[in-house]
Image (tube, rainbow, N blue to C red):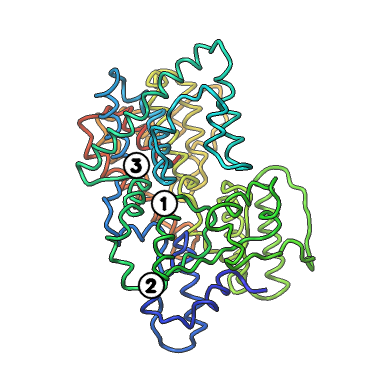
Amino acid sequence: MKSFLEKVVAATIDLPPRKTLILFPTQRACQEYRKIIATAKQQADWLPAILPIRDLLLNLKAPLLADDLTLLLELYEVHRELFKEEEFEKFISYGQQLIDDFNEIDRQAINPDLLFEEINDLKSLEARFSPGEEDFEYIRSFWSEFVRTPLTPLQDQFLHYWKQLPVLYHEFRKRLESKNLSYEGMAWRKVADTMAEQDYFSKYSTVIFAGFYALNKTEEKVMEALKKQGKLMLLRDADTFYTDNKMHEAGMFFRKGMLADSSIPWLEDYFSIPKEVYSVKGCSGRFAIAREMASSLHHRQQQREVSVEQESLVVVLADESLLFPLLHFCGRLGITTNPSMGFSLKHHPLIRLMHLIKTVRQFEDSSENSALKYKQLQEFCAEPLFKRIFTEEELGLNSKAYAAADVSNFHDYFSQLLFKQPVDSREEQSNILALLDKFRFREEEWIQQIHFQLVHAIKQVFTILELHETEISLNVWWQLFWNQWN
């Protein structure tokens, strides 16, 4: 059975490469497609233009995409002008959610004034939807709670704020437009509304969207414009197991919009095909799952005398938190893996250590409590990576007298890092970078590339935070820094 990308290659290999643009949902899909088509061509030749959908914006006439932190600070300024003064620490808790909501409004090309209208009559709500439309039931169940009277104080407060959101939305967009900035949904809405001016597409006779699962309205609008020009090709990766089952949420987006067209290839029936071999094993806890999976891969590798990488074996995890323990056990068993594009940096063990530093900073009084200090040092020094740098004695691992709570059992570096309050955010940045710099990994270790990416990402966040260091306290600095990993 051919993989989806192999089928995409077969469908596109004969197209004129310099006149073809292929768009995938992710960078990884782009890289794999390049490998497969290069092998299939078997000779030197041009490749088509291949882009992840997010990078397409860089080539179109659209406002610049602002980073999350800049958007949050800009929204706070608008919020502060329109409504009552509010501490930034409180605003952070819901500010990012507002940006996400505004982003979705624009991606779906929704009229915000209609969206934020109070619904007093469910009949009027029903009139806005087509018969049998799946979204209607979700929205109807939400607003049915507000039709009943009297309203609770919480519901009344929600409605008051709900009516103010259109003003906030419009003013936020105006502020960003004045600076030629945007969030992703806003940029896509601009592109969709100005397709006649987007001359980037004029270079191509065929524009292919491959492997997209959930198209939003702005993407569909762009596709409709390309379809009218005779340039659009859609390739989907769907299965009847969930597309034909209306109770299956995974197929919802294949049952509506452009992807519902039955003429679009490919709709497979993979799940109905009997599998040659499968096994079911019970495991307790994520470490047990990871250990068992690594052991199975190792056993398979030994039996077939071929590496997992050479076999192009794919492991699909139910939860991304399983990835780090799986890679750890694979590394111990000598199994080569390629996790660099699928590993979420928030699962790097040093992120957990930074969270502990943040927690200690919030409770300055802990420095006066020797028992609490001892416990925090124990938790911090329990990170196995420290064994690369410090002795067991310096990590307090040889200490047996917990009752004494003697912090001198640990190397002085840890007490200085955790309990010495920094003067400002610059000093805190130096502390964190010094901690990261202590770790060195061999090139063949799976964590080496991920650690490099983490350091690079943290430095990028620091660069952005430095632009606003005079406006925010150290506590807010930590909140903003930590938001980047959640």
* Disc 2 element: strand
* 136 lies above or below 388: above
User: Pointer 2: residues within 10 angstroms few (<14), some, or many (20+)?
Assistant: some
User: Pointer 3: residues within 10 angstroms few (<14), some, or many (20+)?
Assistant: some
Do the numbered discs 1 and 2 sit on residues whose CB atoms are within 8 Å?
A: no
Disc 1 residue type (three-letter): Thr
Label 3 and label 2: CA atoms lie apart by 29 Å
Q: Quadrant of the C terminus?
A: top left
Disc 3 residue type (three-letter): Asp
Residue at screen point 77% across, 48% down: 282
Q: Which residue is mark 2?
A: 49
Disc 2 residue type (three-letter): Ala
Percent across and percent down for residue 394 are 45, 40
**For residue 159, what is the image quadrant?**
top left
* Disc 1 element: helix
Percent across and percent down for residue 472 are 26, 29
Nearer-N-terminus badge (1/2): 2
Percent across and percent down for residue 388 are 46, 51
Number of numbered tags placed on the structure image = 3
Nearer-N-terminus badge (3/2): 2
Residue placed most toward the observer, 44 or 238: 238
**For residue 265, what is the image quadrant?**
bottom right
Q: Which residue is mark 1?
A: 218
